[in-house]
């Protein structure tokens, strides 16, 4: 059953016979994106050369794309900037947050956060050398860890491994009640669930665009800064393209207006062209509807897998309101089992130590796909097909 008002599988180039349950890691190719990138390469770069920065709108492209991401996360026009990688954007948001609370020394995250977010925080702490500490309580204990010494609360809304979802409004309120700055990582939220970052009141949000937004491998990240504080934010990575007037070539840094100051260097034009094309898919799409469709599909998937394959233990919350747009199952030999699934055209991924992860993306998956995937999963697990030697060899990317 296709949802009539949602974009459909026809918009994406997904190989025949593939059930793609990994759009939470790398979204599939929108069919019209290659032509847009080819134009940027051949006509704009090839034909216009350096002139293209002006004639092909390259200088405006980062903000144009940012303004297309903004409504998908409930942000106002001008409050989002694009560029760099998510790791860099995490660093920038946290560095700015710590400068806003110079008399506090604690950063609260959680033990379910994606490691790079924690690594970036630790690296920043070491660089500052001011005695900041990073606390990583269990996700359920975050609120009790937020006290008067906390400078910033930095959380990923949807856990990359389990799909567990934090209550954005509630945690932000707790952070603000304690006087802390709130940073949300929306890597597994943008394009997956309805987000109202403006209503949450959070100061910063960051995210990537190659997961549910389908921008392609290495697509630029985004950063949101709450409009009323944007002009006070002091960028730690004060690059020339975050300068008020890059082509004045002043020796002193003056931050650009609003969130544009969070840009650093030369934007990746070909990647931005792909992302710009990928965002066409979202024109007029209601995120509430996407979230509802995803919850319904996930319910079918959980039911079908559990009934056919009791060996797999659900690792994601059962309550859709507490889950993002993915379903994870624990299985000790999950890596080998996932390789066997991939060989059979059911593509998910594996996260150490035991998590088989399946992204649910209603833009190109329907109820029948959920049942079909569950049948293949049951075959692989129930017949021990995953035990074949070729499935045991670990690749670099799992
Ligand atoms: C995917 C993901 C990242 C990846 O960061 P990159 O710099 O884009 O490689 C970071 N944080 C979270 C929470 C993620 O889910």
Image (cartoon, rainbow, N blue to C red):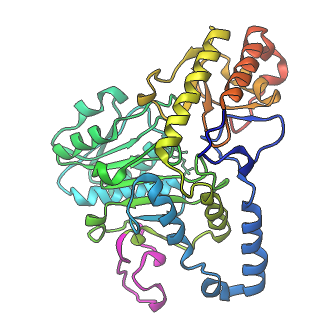
Q: What secondary structure is the magenta-colored segment mainly?
A: loop
* Percent of width and height locating residue 164: 45, 30
Quick check: 206 left or right of 340? left
Which residue is farthest front? 4
Above or below for 5 versus 34 = above
Instruction: State whether residue 20 is above or below residue 222.
Output: above
Judge whether residue 76 can be spotted in this image: yes
59 and 105: which one is in front? Answer: 59
Q: Is residue 181 above or below residue 380?
A: below
Residue depicted at 42% across the width and 86% down the height: 245
Q: Is residue 327 visible?
A: no
Front residue of this view, candidates 111 and 289: 289
Name the one closer to the observer, 290 or 241: 290
Q: Quadrant of the N terminus?
A: top right
Q: Position of residue 22 (x, y in %)?
A: 66, 37
Q: Is residue 208 above or below residue 50?
A: above
Q: Position of residue 305 (x, y in %)?
A: 64, 16
> Residue sitting at 68 percent across and 32 percent down?
348
Question: Residues in magenta?
Answer: 237-258
377 relative to 329 in the view: left or right: right
């Amino acid at each position: 059953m296709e949802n009539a008002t949602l974009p459909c599988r026809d918009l994406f180039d997904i190989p025949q016979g593939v059930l793609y349950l990994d759009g939470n890691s790398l979204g599939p190719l929108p069919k019209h994106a290659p032509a847009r990138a080819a134009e940027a390469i051949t006509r704009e770069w090839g034909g216009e050369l350096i002139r293209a920065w002006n004639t092909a709108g390259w200088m405006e492209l980062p903000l144009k794309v940012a303004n297309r991401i903004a409504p998908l996360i409930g942000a106002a026009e001008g409050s989002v900037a694009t560029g760099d990688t998510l790791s860099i954007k995490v660093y920038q948001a946290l560095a700015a947050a710590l400068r806003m609370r110079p008399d506090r020394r604690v950063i609260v995250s959680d033990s379910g956060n994606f490691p790079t977010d924690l690594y970036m925080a630790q690296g920043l702490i070491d660089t500052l050398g001011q005695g900041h500490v990073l606390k990583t309580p269990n996700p359920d204990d975050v609120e009790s860890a937020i006290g008067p010494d906390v400078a910033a609360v930095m959380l990923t809304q949807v856990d990359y491994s389990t799909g567990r979802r934090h209550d954005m409004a509630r945690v932000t309120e707790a952070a603000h009640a304690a006087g802390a700055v709130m940073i949300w990582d929306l890597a597994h939220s943008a394009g997956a669930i309805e987000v109202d970052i403006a209503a949450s009141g959070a100061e910063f949000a960051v995210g990537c665009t190659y997961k549910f937004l389908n921008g392609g491998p290495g697509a630029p990240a985004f950063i949101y800064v709450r409009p009323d504080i944007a002009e006070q934010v002091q960028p730690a990575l004060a690059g020339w393209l975050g300068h008020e007037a890059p082509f004045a070539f002043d020796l002193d840094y003056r931050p650009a207006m609003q969130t544009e100051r969070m840009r650093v260097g030369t934007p990746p034009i070909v990647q931005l062209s792909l992302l710009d094309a990928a965002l066409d898919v979202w024109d007029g799409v209601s995120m509430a509807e996407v979230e509802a469709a995803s919850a319904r599909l996930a319910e079918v998937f959980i039911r079908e897998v559990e009934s056919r394959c009791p060996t797999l233990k659900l690792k994601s919350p059962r309550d859709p309101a507490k889950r993002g747009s993915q379903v994870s199952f624990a299985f000790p030999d999950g890596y080998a089992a996932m390789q066997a699934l991939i060989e059979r055209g059911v593509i998910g991924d594996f996260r150490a130590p035991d998590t088989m992860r399946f992204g649910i993306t209603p833009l190109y998956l329907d109820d029948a796909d959920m049942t079909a995937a569950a049948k293949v999963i049951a075959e692989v697990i129930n017949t021990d097909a995953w035990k074949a030697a070729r499935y045991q060899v670990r690749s670099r990317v799992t």
